[in-house]
Image: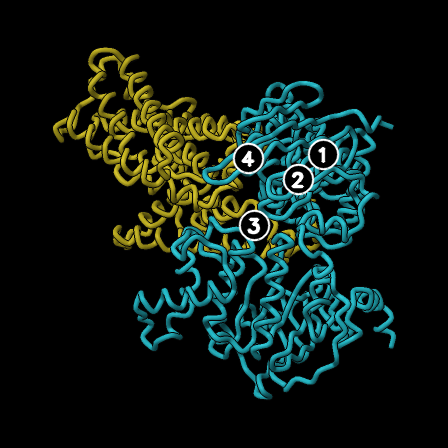
């Protein structure tokens, strides 16, 4: 497996394969030393919970990006599903959960249809869907926040509950991530995303059903985003027409920081989880620092994303030429 | 041993028409079980149309196809593959980032309780490649191996898919001799298993070495089917080209040693592992050939001359004065021009017209402000279309619609409008049919006769022999010899390359 021996090659190999995990652990270790309040269970749990929603979208996005696509519609999907949950919460708990997920699936199928049948590039297709879905969210709410009625306390549990000391949203994220990781590495569909991102024509000639694979990826992303929207509304106790705005960029950033190349063909769910958590902990550390203006968060995040991508590019070409 | 008269594939009376062209006119084509069948013909002969019909990419207008005794009605490429016909294209048909093992089994991985069993997948891949006599690490990504190995991985996949017929479309065009040798030994193994190979190649030596039978197409019509031993090279070319083949093979033109005024000199060029101190001189108006096997550093040297890549060491002098190019633009400024070996990637601007492709680089040369009236543009383009004899319905034609030979001529014209002093041509006739090849070679000599120096890189020694005043032979990044005048022939080139090991002792 290893082509070279010795410490440095082994280290660069480790960094190339698990760079984001190493970065995450390193960051957590350093932050634990500097900020006593960082290493409290409560703080760590909070970060996990904050990131679990974007994390769900990012897991779906990983499949899309590995197969060479992009999905900009997820923020709107999060808003619409959250609103639908709020609107239906009074009539039936079951409907309030199932309907948003179904609508999410429909949005994903629409994305996939536009991309695979109408041959519109994913960037434009999902940008259009993003605007349209956001518009639907405005229309059905008239730009007003919709309160969630929660007689049975189920939504409070979804948003704020704990199972064995783990916040419910974190649990959902963990289960989804593990299942997705297995799908990604050990199923025909999972591998097909890599094949398509690597060389779509070759994949088609190798018998990969490219259109079907893309359909699954986009639908998965939208359904997981709907799930994120459900959790978001449940947490806030309201469905908001402006909810989830810009989350597509956070999800994409999480995927990219994790080490999945936006050009497709490489990456993984584990990397994305690390990437999303890195983002979460950076925000957290900036907040703990206290004296940093929170507007600086964005500037720092931008720098970090850029740094990560540059390092990855160097690692890639260096590895190949050596 | 398989009965070699038993038919595997019978294509009868195949007709295919495109708007305005009859691409195939009642073509018969047969392949027997366990044979290597080479399909030959110039571009436009209908080779690729026939292959595309067989592999389900085009629908046939008339005719029938029997495969293994049953009618083959190709639905699409995938369907044909499932029926036992695997195609290996010149371009990679694998997924570069995925491992060797995964590429072999992609879509049909070994499962354990529904999940992919990676351990077994790797073991089976290892076994399969061992059987083919290849010892490579199956866990590494395909992109970490060269083209030859990639082709063989594709072959491994085809055999595992139980292909009865493997179509290899110009599989060897980017391989060196050693790689071809390994590929051929694998093809012999496949033959022994009763697998038939349909092989397409422009390299005559290879064709005679590997073919059991040869079918020749010309202008959409079958010229005939021959056993390999029946034909001489000259006969084969005559049948393919149909005009004056003796001229094509006239490589024994005796040339005198000529002296050319000094022009460009490269001294002791070193770069990474590819170049270990190469020297090269080019005289004014001289055609210098750079001969060597694949990986000998020919292209690397040319790119360094042109400022496209950096060198670690060494000097480049023009008329005795050192120059330091960091960008191709600087080299172009000094009158250098470079036609890359990869037309698709570094040459043509796809989906742009012939006119734009030709003028894009030289507008600034025509006029200081780079503003040239459409009228003047058309005059220039027409002049070069005539000069290099480009066959195109109009200068507004999308370049992607031209044949490879004509695309290459457009690129030549692009550089000629720049009025270069030195034209570097890297594999100018690669993937081009015999007729167009001849024309390009004529152009090269014509250009040289106008006083433009030419550095010609070609893997086809005959081409170098026919066109060069002097040959610089390189191997593994250093000079191993020079041939001039009457010394220039294929045998000598090969002798010089083979001598390399002794040279170091001297």
Quarter residue B476 falls in: bottom right
> Circle 1 marks a residue in which chain?
B
Q: Nearer the viewer, mark 1 or mark 4?
A: 4
- How many numbered badges does the structure rendering display? 4
Q: What residue do we see at 54% from left, 59% from top?
A: B408
Residue B10's place in the image compared with B288, above or below, is above
Mark whose residue sits in front, 3 or 2: 2
Q: CA distance from mark 1 to mark 3?
A: 28 Å
Identify the image quadrant of the C terminus of chain B: bottom right
Q: How is the image coloured?
A: by chain
Which residue is identified by label 3? A15
Tag 1 and tag 2, C-beta contact below 8 Å: yes
Colour seen for chain B: cyan
Pointer 2: what residue? B100
| Residue shown at 41% from the left, 29% from the top | A173
Cα distance, mark 4 to mark 2? Answer: 14 Å
């Amino acid at each position: 497996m290893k082509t070279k021996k010795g410490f440095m090659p082994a280290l660069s190999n480790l960094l190339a394969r698990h760079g984001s995990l190493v970065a995450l652990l390193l960051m957590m270790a350093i932050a634990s030393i500097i900020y006593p309040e960082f290493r409290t269970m409560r703080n760590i749990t909070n970060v996990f919970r904050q990131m679990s929603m974007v994390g769900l979208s990012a897991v779906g996005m990983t499949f899309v990006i590995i197969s060479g696509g992009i999905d900009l519609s997820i923020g709107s999907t999060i808003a619409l599903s959250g609103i639908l949950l709020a609107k239906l919460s009074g009539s039936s708990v079951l409907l309030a959960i199932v309907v948003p997920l179904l609508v999410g699936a429909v949005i994903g199928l629409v994305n996939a249809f536009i991309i695979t049948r109408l041959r519109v590039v994913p960037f434009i297709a999902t940008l259009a869907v993003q605007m349209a879905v956001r518009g639907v969210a405005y229309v059905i709410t008239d730009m007003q926040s919709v309160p969630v009625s929660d007689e049975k306390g189920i939504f409070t549990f979804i948003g704020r509950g704990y199972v064995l000391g783990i916040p419910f949203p974190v649990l959902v994220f963990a289960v989804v991530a593990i299942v997705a990781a297995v799908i990604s590495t050990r199923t025909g569909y999972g591998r097909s995303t890599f094949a398509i991102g690597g060389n779509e024509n070759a994949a088609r000639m190798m018998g990969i059903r490219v259109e079907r694979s893309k359909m699954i990826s986009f639908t998965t992303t939208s359904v997981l985003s709907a799930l994120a929207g459900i959790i978001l509304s449940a947490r806030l106790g309201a469905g908001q027409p402006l909810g989830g705005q810009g989350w597509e960029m956070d999800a994409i950033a999480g995927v990219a920081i994790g080490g999945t190349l936006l050009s497709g063909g490489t990456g993984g769910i584990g990397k994305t989880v690390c990437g999303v958590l890195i983002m979460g902990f950076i925000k957290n550390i900036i907040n703990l620092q206290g004296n940093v203006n929170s507007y600086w968060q964005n500037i720092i995040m931008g720098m970090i994303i850029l740094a990560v991508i540059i390092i990855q590019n160097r690692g890639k070409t260096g590895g190949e030429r050596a | 041993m398989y009965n070699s008269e038993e038919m595997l594939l019978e294509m009868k009376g195949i007709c295919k028409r495109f708007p305005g062209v009859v691409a195939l006119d009642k073509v018969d084509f047969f392949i027997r079980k366990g044979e290597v069948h080479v399909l030959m013909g110039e571009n436009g002969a209908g080779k690729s149309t026939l292959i595309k019909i067989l592999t389900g990419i085009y629908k046939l207008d008339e005719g029938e196809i029997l495969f293994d005794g049953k009618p083959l009605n190709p639905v699409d490429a995938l369907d044909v593959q499932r029926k036992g016909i695997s195609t290996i294209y010149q371009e990679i048909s694998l997924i570069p980032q995925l491992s060797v093992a995964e590429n072999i089994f992609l879509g049909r991985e070994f499962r354990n309780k529904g999940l992919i069993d990676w351990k077994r997948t790797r073991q089976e891949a290892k076994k399969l490649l061992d059987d083919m006599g290849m010892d490579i690490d199956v866990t590494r990504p395909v992109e970490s191996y060269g083209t030859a190995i990639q082709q063989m991985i594709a072959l491994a996949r085809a055999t595992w898919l139980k292909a009865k017929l493997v179509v290899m479309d110009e599989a060897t065009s980017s391989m060196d001799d050693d790689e071809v040798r390994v590929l051929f030994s694998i093809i012999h193994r496949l033959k022994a298993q009763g697998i038939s190979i349909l092989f397409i190649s422009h390299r005559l030596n290879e064709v005679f070495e590997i073919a059991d039978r040869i079918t020749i197409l010309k202008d959409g019509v079958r010229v005939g089917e021959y056993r390999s031993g029946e034909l001489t090279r000259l006969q084969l070319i005559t049948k393919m080209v149909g005009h004056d083949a003796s001229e094509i093979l006239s490589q024994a033109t005796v040339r005198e040693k000529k002296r050319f005024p000094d022009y460009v000199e490269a001294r002791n060029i070193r770069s990474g592992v590819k170049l270990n101190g190469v020297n090269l001189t080019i005289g004014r108006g001289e055609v210098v050939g750079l001969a060597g096997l694949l990986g000998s550093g020919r292209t690397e040297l040319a790119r360094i001359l042109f400022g496209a890549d950096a060198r670690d060491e060494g000097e480049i002098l023009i008329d005795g004065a050192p120059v330091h190019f960091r960008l191709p633009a600087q080299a172009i400024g000094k009158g250098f021009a470079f036609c890359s070996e990869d037309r698709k990637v570094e040459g043509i601007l796809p989906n742009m017209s012939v006119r734009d492709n030709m003028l894009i680089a030289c507008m600034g040369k025509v006029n200081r402000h780079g503003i040239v009236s459409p009228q003047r543009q058309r005059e220039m383009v027409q002049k070069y279309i005539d000069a290099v004899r480009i066959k195109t319905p109009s200068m507004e034609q999308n370049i992607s619609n031209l044949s490879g030979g004509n695309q290459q001529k457009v690129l030549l014209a692009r550089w000629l409008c720049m009025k270069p002093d030195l034209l570097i041509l890297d594999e100018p006739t690669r993937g081009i049919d015999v007729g167009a090849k001849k024309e390009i070679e004529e152009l090269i000599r014509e250009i040289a006769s106008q006083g433009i120096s030419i550095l010609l890189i070609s893997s086809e020694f005959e081409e170098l022999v026919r066109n060069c005043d002097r040959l610089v032979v390189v191997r593994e990044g250093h000079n191993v010899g020079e041939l001039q005048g009457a010394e220039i022939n294929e045998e000598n080139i090969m002798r010089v390359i083979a001598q390399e090991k002794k040279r170091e002792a001297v």
